[in-house]
Image (tube, rainbow, N blue to C red):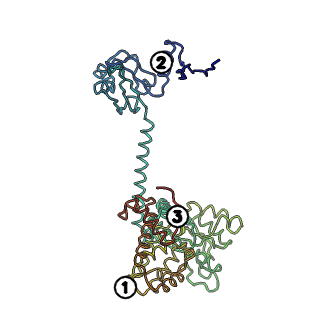
């Protein structure tokens, strides 16, 4: 007995599965498939007479199939029922034709007309597929608008960079530009601004930028360091006093800093150092826009824009009852976080060059940083932020004996290699292998190019190399210098 699997014939070949039981069922099922297709389907015979139109075609085009069935495409074109017939083009050119069309429904579609030929190569039918791409077109338009908005934002940020107060701020890193964008957005309003960031990140420069671009730029800009004024003098400095208010007081009295800032901006630096008992009086200034001098009997109305700054965690201080919760929320109307220098690496080099340029102008020097010196500055973590960078640049200018400032004049520690170790290594070397030195320098440039562009092809192009040469040399030079090329994703 020979057992056959289902569908297997005696000769070992597979029979085609029977989908339909008869021609009538096949016709009905195929009609159902066409009718329920998401895409519009339009079928003509070989002479462009309409023989089939599905529901999706009616929905997309807004045309009624009853007005089209049996009609020739040339007739429909002449009657402006359709603007152009892909079926006619497919019959005339004997090829697949693809068109883009927009219909009276407002829908946009891609139309593909495919001729079907018999064994003799004669076209017996043309099947046209109509795919609704309205949503895709909308997404494309939306992406276009987004790109325009991004370009406007980029231009605005470039404008922001050009308008930086006193040219003392540098903003090339995206993180810095983000903070500047929010500063620019709020500068034209009178909202209270809270600048948050570590010591030395440039909070005062941000405050000056907000003032310089505000409606109060013609008024005064008063800076108050809340942590530098002794607590027993803070009230009289901020709010002023009447004559004879206390022993040693001026006989004419004194205006407080809030009154001096009237119609202008007051910058309250280190607001987290404000004594707890002073916070109540300060809250009144924010809420009522008025101050009461020491020894005074009536409040004085003021019109002041407040910009505050701190390097402390005020939210944690509120939890510890070291800072008033109501004052915290009054100050946090518009907080702006200013990133530390280690999070804005692209700003390090231009800042260093800015400070060096200022020192060159001041002392009549013509000093410049070497490539290695700049790389060293970029690798350092800068716990003291911009303030530390400025001081270090001045120190390097003093230490260096030549116009070129090398890494030996920059006393910072980066990783395991310190400046002294580099110097000792240099002193121990009695001769130079020129070939190895050139390879080392070329490797530095290749690594820098790779960091900049993020892929081999563009990095190689920037150095005038082919990609295979770039990969080969990079591997070779890394091995010569016992340098492990970082594992990166394939380009």
Residue 364 is labelled as 1
Residue highlighted by disc 2: 31
Asked whether the viewer can see residue 83, the reply is no
Question: Which mark is first along the chain, 2 or 1?
Answer: 2
Q: Position of residue 7 (x, y in %)?
A: 57, 21
Residue 459 place in picture, x, y as percent: 41, 62
* Residue farthest to the front, as pictured: 1
Hey, which quadrant is residue 123 in on the image? top left
4 in relation to 378, above or below: above
Q: CA distance from mark 2 to mark 3?
A: 61 Å
Q: Nearer the viewer, residue 109 or 299?
A: 109
Q: Which is more N-terminal, label 3 or label 2?
A: 2
Q: CA distance from mark 1 to mark 2?
A: 89 Å
Q: Residues within 10 Å of mark 1 (few under 14, many from 20)?
A: few
Locate residue 225 relative to residue 115 in the image: left or right. Answer: right
The residue to which callout 3 is attached is 486
Residue under the image location 60 percent in, 21 percent down = 6
Rendered location of residue 408, percent (x, y): 48, 82
Compared to residue 309, the image places residue 107 above or below, namely: above
In this view, the mark in front (3 or 1): 3
> Callout 2: helix, strand or loop?
helix
- Mark 3 residue crowding within 10 angstroms, few (<14) / some (14–19) / many (20+): few
Foreground residue among 265 and 142: 142
165 on left or right of 273: left
Q: Of helix, strand and loop, which one carries label 3? A: loop
Q: Nearer the viewer, residue 407 or 461?
A: 461
């Amino acid at each position: 007995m020979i057992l056959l699997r289902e569908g297997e014939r005696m000769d070992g070949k597979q029979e085609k599965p029977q989908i339909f039981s008869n021609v009538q069922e096949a016709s009905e099922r195929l009609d159902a498939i066409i009718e329920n297709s998401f895409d519009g389907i339009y079928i003509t015979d070989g002479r462009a007479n309409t023989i089939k139109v599905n529901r999706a075609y009616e929905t997309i085009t807004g045309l009624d199939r009853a007005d089209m069935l049996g009609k020739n495409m040339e007739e429909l074109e002449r009657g402006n029922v359709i603007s152009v017939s892909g079926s006619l083009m497919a019959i005339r050119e004997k090829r697949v034709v693809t068109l883009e069309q927009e219909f009276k429904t407002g829908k946009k579609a891609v139309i593909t007309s495919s001729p079907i030929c018999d064994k003799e190569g004669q076209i017996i039918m043309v099947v046209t597929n109509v795919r609704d791409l309205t949503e895709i077109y909308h997404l494309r338009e939306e992406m276009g608008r987004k790109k325009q908005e991004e370009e406007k934002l980029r231009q605005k940020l470039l404008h922001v960079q050009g308008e930086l107060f006193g040219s003392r701020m540098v903003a090339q890193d995206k993180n810095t530009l983000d903070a500047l964008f929010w500063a620019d957005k709020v500068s034209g309003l009178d909202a209270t601004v809270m600048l948050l960031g570590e010591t030395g990140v440039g909070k005062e420069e941000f405050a000056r930028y907000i003032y310089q671009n505000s409606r109060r730029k013609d008024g005064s800009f008063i800076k108050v360091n809340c942590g530098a004024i002794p607590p027993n003098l803070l009230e009289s400095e901020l709010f002023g006093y009447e004559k004879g208010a206390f022993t040693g007081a001026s006989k004419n009295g004194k205006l407080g800093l809030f009154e001096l800032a009237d119609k202008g901006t007051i910058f309250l630096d280190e607001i987290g150092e404000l004594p707890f008992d002073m916070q109540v009086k300060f809250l009144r200034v924010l809420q009522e826009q008025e101050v009461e001098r020491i020894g005074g009997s009536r409040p004085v109305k003021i019109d002041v824009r407040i910009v505050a700054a701190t390097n402390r965690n005020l939210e944690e201080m509120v939890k510890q009852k070291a800072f008033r919760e109501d004052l915290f929320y009054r100050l946090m109307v518009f907080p702006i976080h200013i990133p530390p220098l280690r999070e804005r690496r692209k700003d390090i080099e231009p800042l260093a060059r800015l400070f060096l340029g200022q020192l060159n102008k001041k002392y009549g020097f013509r000093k410049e940083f070497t490539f290695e010196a700049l790389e060293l500055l970029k690798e350092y973590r800068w716990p003291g932020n911009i303030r530390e960078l400025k001081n270090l640049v001045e120190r390097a200018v003093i230490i260096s004996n030549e116009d070129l400032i090398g890494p030996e004049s920059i006393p910072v520690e980066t990783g395991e290699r310190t400046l002294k170790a580099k110097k000792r290594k240099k002193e121990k070397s009695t001769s130079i292998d020129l070939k190895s030195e050139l390879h080392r320098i070329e490797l530095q440039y290749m690594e820098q190019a790779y960091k900049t562009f993020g892929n081999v092809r563009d990095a190689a192009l920037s150095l005038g190399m082919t990609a295979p040469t770039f990969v080969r040399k990079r591997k070779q030079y890394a091995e010569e210098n016992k340098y492990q090329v970082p594992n990166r994703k394939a380009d």
